[in-house]
Amino acid sequence: MQILENFSLADFNSFGINARAAFLIKVRSKKMLRAAIAQQKKPLMILGGGSNILLTRDVSGLVLKNEIKGKKIVATGENTALVAVGGGENWHRFVLWTLKNNLGGVENLSLIPGTVGAAPIQNIGAYGVELKDVFEKLEAVDLKTGETQIFDKNDCRFGYRESIFKTTLKGRFFITKVFFRLTTTRHFLHTGYGDIQSTLDQTGIKNPTIHDVSKAVIAIRTSKLPDPAKLGNAGSFFKNPEISAGLFEKLQAENPAMPSYPQPNNLVKIPAGWLIEQCGWKGKRVGNAGSHARQALVVGNYGGAPGEEIGQLAQSIRRSVFEKFGIELTPEVNVI
């Protein structure tokens, strides 16, 4: 097991921030993970694809880079397959693997950056589908004891871009394997969210397959979101806020064009990108950080911006949205 010292994380985070880890181990098995825990180089930080973090400082302890791989069908049932996937697998490559094997359920989640192990932490979602919709269970190692524990859907306490691994168990467990329940035939397609149906219509597809839906999602995401390889970013920096129906009625009276999506429990979801754009941030830069010209919800590193500078811009955006609308934006990105 190689322990890398004073290691640059620039290539391991999608903002391209040149923060350094005092120690880093590339974990490729549970055996290696337990050996890494035994090093006692604390604090411990888990790193997947680095697509949902903003590093504002160097990491003084040990970084555990999840590189546990493997994808296989472990059981089949009537119209379903149970799939086990290593936590270090690239999420989009996993989606492509499901399509190759005619497994349905995650096609709407195409091109989301990051690893499979990080996906349940965030309860990733896009175009009407969330990870919890296909999630069966996961296997994780307790970083305090080294013991393996199984979490089912109820244990994970999934919410909107939320799970127990972002709250009470944050930083406690290293996710080694995730199990998904996918369809093998009679796939249920989600085409009514966003521009999926219109994209399919434009290409003349009348009876879409899971492959067609994936291609449509990829086309939409590519047209709206910048490639992190060309512009450092973590995708959507903020969650879409959910507000009370009462507050929405008040705001809509003042802003008739405000888009909205009704939610359970008398709540209304408002697109964070629209709020940010109304505050004049879309396409605006401060130093080397800025809100993207095509999607205001994306905060980008336009060249050499330190993490602190990007974090300060995000805070300025949050303040202006709260001052104008009385709505508190919550970051999707994990600020370290």
Image (cartoon, rainbow, N blue to C red):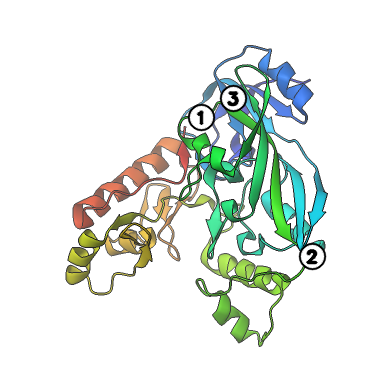
Whether label 2 touches label 1, CB < 8 Å:
no
Question: Where does the image place residue 90, in percent across and percent down from the top left?
Answer: 70, 47
* Residue visible at 34% across and 55% down in the picture: 242
* Residue visible at 66% across and 47% down in the picture: 136
Q: Amino acid at mark 3?
A: Ala
Q: Which residue is mark 1?
A: 169
Residue 290 as seen in the image, left or right of residue 228: left
Give how far apart the Cα atoms at labels 3 and 1 are.
23 Å
**Residue 251: quarter of image:** bottom left
Residue 293 as seen in the image, left or right of residue 245: right
Q: Residues within 10 Å of mark 2 (few under 14, many from 20)?
A: some
- Which element is circle 3 on? strand
Q: Earlier in the sequence, mark 2 or mark 3?
A: 3
263 or 58: which is nearer to us?
A: 263
Q: Residue furthest front?
A: 78
167 or 154: which is nearer to us?
A: 154
Is residue 174 something one can see in this rendering?
yes
Rendered position, 149 above or below 60: below
* Residue visible at 51% across and 40% down in the picture: 53
Rendered position, 104 above or below 213: above
Q: Earlier in the sequence, mark 3 or mark 1?
A: 3
Is residue 115 something one can see in this rendering?
no
Q: Which residue is mark 2?
A: 102
Give how far apart the Cα atoms at labels 2 and 1 are.
35 Å
